[in-house]
Amino acid sequence: MAAAFRQGLLCNVLHPKAAIFFLALMPQFLRPDATVVDAVLLAAVAASVALVWFFGVANLVAAMRRLLERPRVRRTIDAVSGVALLGLGVRLAATRL
């Protein structure tokens, strides 16, 4: 789990879109006379919210993984996916005629 966390953190820290997003968006929430402390506090709030969000998502995924590993659930998902793909294939074939 620590390796996955490090990989995700490194990916987010080095992601240029995330940096551009924060450089463009964050200053809009600061007063013109804001200090460095204000900027750091705003960044800490954003980081805290992201951390809580990702811990929530990780816990949800862990719970869903236990559910999705059950053979009956997997068979049901495979059957529903197969029926959906067959339906899409039939629809595609019917529109080409």
Image (cartoon, helix red, strand yellow):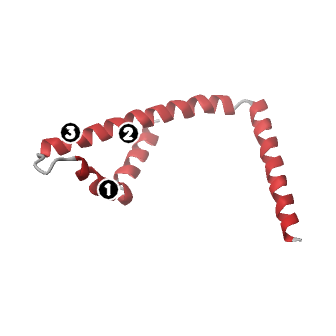
The answer to whether marks 1 and 2 mark residues whose Cβ atoms lie closer than 8 Å is no
Q: Which residue is mark 3?
A: 41
Dot 2 surroundings within 10 Å: few (below 14), some, or many (20 or more)?
A: few
Q: Which mark is drawn over residue 19?
A: 1
Label 2 sits on what residue type?
Ala
Q: CA distance from mark 1 to mark 2?
A: 14 Å
Tally of numbered tags = 3
Q: Which residue shows up at 16% across the image and 47% down it?
A: 31
The foreground one among 96 and 77 is 96
Task: Give left or right: position of 82 versus 6.
Answer: right
Q: Which residue shows up at 79% across the image and 49% down it?
A: 84
Q: Which residue shows up at 36% across the image and 60% down it?
A: 16
Residue 3: which quarter of the image? top left
Mark 1 vs 3, N-terminal side: 1
Mark 3 vs 2, N-terminal side: 3
Residue 62: which quarter of the image? top right
**Secondary structure category for the residue under label 1:** helix
Q: Which residue shows up at 51% across the image and 30% down it?
A: 59
Q: CA distance from mark 1 to mark 3?
A: 17 Å
Quadrant containing the C terminus is bottom right
Label 3 sits on what residue type?
Leu
Q: Residue 20's x, y, as percent? A: 32, 59
Label 1 sits on what residue type?
Ala
**Secondary structure category for the residue under label 2:** helix
Q: Which mark is drawn over residue 44?
A: none
Task: Give left or right: position of 91 versus 65.
Answer: right
